[in-house]
Image: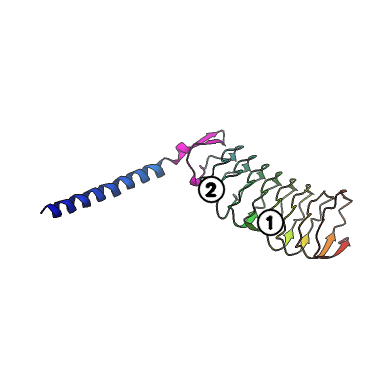
Amino acid sequence: MKKRGATRWTALLLAASVLLCQVFATTALAAPEDDFVVEDGVLTQYLGRGGEVTLPEAVREVGPGVFQGNRDLIRVTFGPNVVKIGDNAFRDSGLTGSLTLPAGLQSIGSAAFYGCTRLISTLTVPPSVQSVGNDAFRGCTGLTGLGLSEGLLTIGSNAFRDCAGFRGDLIIPDTVTNVASAAFYNCAGFDGRLQLSASMTVVNDSVFAECVNLTGELVIPDSVTRMEYYNPFYNSPKVTAVRFGA
């Protein structure tokens, strides 16, 4: 009899524990807005612990440094109205896996994702994006592919520096007018061809230096009027030929 009573109490305690866990989980899911400080559409502060975070629809801009250094952040889902990701917004955070940028995004700030080494898979920059800031994805060594879309205008210095995991072709869309110095420095994994934008007028210092596995013929478009002093294509031993003009 005593054994049967103890078993009954154990079962009741287990049931109560499960119920309490469900209550706490429901409470946590019901009040995610409390984790965000949003001022005039700008997310200025994140008060949560991390994990998988979904931004409120009211957010139009992720402010500077909001998630910087948050190693507990695993994944972020952007709301449909986000048009800007500020400087250092996710720098050195724990973002893991793939990153899906919002369809209406217009600009990515300087060092926005600098050092997010746990990001993997292909990074696709939507056609709405006009500028990628300095150091924006620098050191994101786990990314394996890069898709840049027509509509992009400028790529900042060191924007993709040391993203050595990229594979395949590197295609700079024809809408791009400027790729700043060292933007793709040491992207050693690219093992396809390099296609420059027909709108570029200057090829800047070290912009594609140490991309040691780029291959095939390199065409310098007619639009290019100047190459900077330090070799933009330094150490590209697999490029088979260089041709000037379309």
**In this picture, residue 80 sits left or right of residue 218:** left
Q: Quadrant of the C terminus?
A: bottom right
Image point (56%, 49%), residue name: 95
Q: Secondary structure at mark 1?
A: loop
Image point (73%, 59%), residue name: 170
User: What x and y, as percent, mark residue 189?
Assistant: 70, 60
Amino acid type shown at disc 1: Ala
User: What x and y, as percent, mark residue 176?
Assistant: 76, 51
Which mark is in front, 2 or 1?
Answer: 1
List the residue tagged with mark 2: 76
Q: Quadrant of the N terminus?
A: bottom left
Amino acid type shown at disc 2: Val
Mark 2 vs mark 1, CA separation in Å: 23 Å
Q: Can residue 175 be found in the magenta stretch?
A: no
Q: Secondary structure at mark 2?
A: strand
In terms of image quadrants, where is residue 233? bottom right
Image point (71%, 54%), residue name: 150
**In this picture, residue 12 sits left or right of residue 143:** left
User: What x and y, as percent, mark residue 55?
Assistant: 52, 43
List the residue tagged with mark 1: 164
Q: Which residues are magenta?
A: 32-56
How many C-alpha atoms fall within 10 Å of the one at disc 2: few (<14), some, or many (≥20)?
some
